[in-house]
Image (cartoon, rainbow, N blue to C red):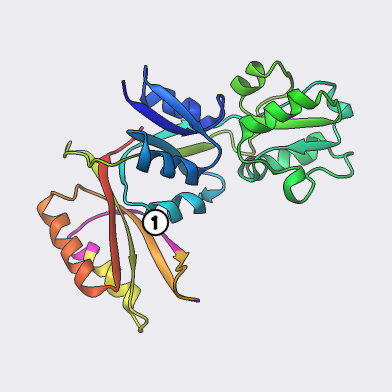
Amino acid sequence: MATIAVLGPVGTFTDEAARRYFSSDKFIYCNSVTEVFEKLEKDCEYGVVPIENSTEGSVAETIDCLQKYNLYVWGEIYHNVSHVLAGTGKLEEVKVIMTHPQAISQCRDKIKKLLKSVPQLIPKGSNGEVLSTAKAMEIVAQKKDPSIAAIGSKNAAEKCGLKILADKLSDREDNETRFFVISKKQQQKTGKDKTSIITAVKDESGALWKLLGIFANENINLTKIESRPRHDKKWEYMFFIDFEGHKDDEKVKNVLKEVEDSTTYLKLLGSYPKGA
């Protein structure tokens, strides 16, 4: 039985996505994305982490960990994210909301309308922000304070015995998060694959244009490109890129060789089947 490191506790959206991908394996729950990578390096066979949300964009910690750790993207999962507000009292009693920063960002407009009379919606710092939405549910259940509520999944709220004070909180009805399955192993070709890389271009005019031209010349479709600061060089940036194809495809091999020759840094994060 495989062991799977997952951002926990039970009831996070990462947990839900992982259970769709792995039906009957052993889950190890971690307190952060970084801990998932650490567990996978030492003890576990796979890990599941969020990589981007359709409303709020990429998860910086995941991209940074993909660069730092010697692991590969094994698969991807697209999972619908529908938030609820849960607590121990009544909606009109809520004064403070605890949740993960990504969750409140995905629900900001609806929360403001729902609780427009609340003088302080999200406390700054650690009082209101926690490492996962499910952890926020656990804290609210333990505190039993009707003035504190949490945003997260309906599944987590029910597991913690909380009342659903409001549902369908996401500002976008089609709110969706993309998750990566990561592994020490690399995937074989399936014919319907994507590849992810991190690269850094030379500090010269037209460098990014030249990089994009390499993919255009081979008629390879980029599905994502995003810059991230380099931690080793101030005011210099790397690019996280997803594109169609597998590393063992002939034209992808050609592209990776050209990218390696024309950039200052290249890390292959893995080739994997397109998710759904």
Residue 112 in view of the camera? yes
The boundaries of the magenta stretch are 215-227
Counting from the top left corner in percent of width and height, residue 120 is at 86, 45
Q: Nearer the viewer, residue 30 or 43?
A: 43
Q: State which quadrant residue 127 falls in.
A: top right
Inspect this view and state whether residue 53 appears: no
Q: Secondary structure at mark 1?
A: helix
- Considering every residue shown, the one lying at the far left of the view is 250
Magenta segment: does it hold 51?
no
Which residue is the site of mark 1?
68
Please say whether residue 221 is one of the residues in the magenta stretch: yes
Q: Residue at x 42, y 39 (%)?
A: 39
Quadrant position of residue 218? bottom left
Which of the image's four quarters has the C terminus?
top left
Picture residue at 36% right of the left edge, 84% below the top: 205
Q: Residue furthest front?
A: 42
- Disc 1 packing (10 Å; few <14; some 14–19; many ≥20): few
Q: Position of residue 239 (x, y in %)?
A: 38, 63
In the picture, residue 108 is in which quadrant?
top right
Q: Is residue 132 above or below residue 163?
A: below
Residue sitting nearer the eye, 47 or 214: 47
Which three-letter amino acid code belongs to the residue tagged 1? Lys
Residue 262 screen position, x and y as percent: 23, 74
Answer above or below: position of 107 versus 239.
above
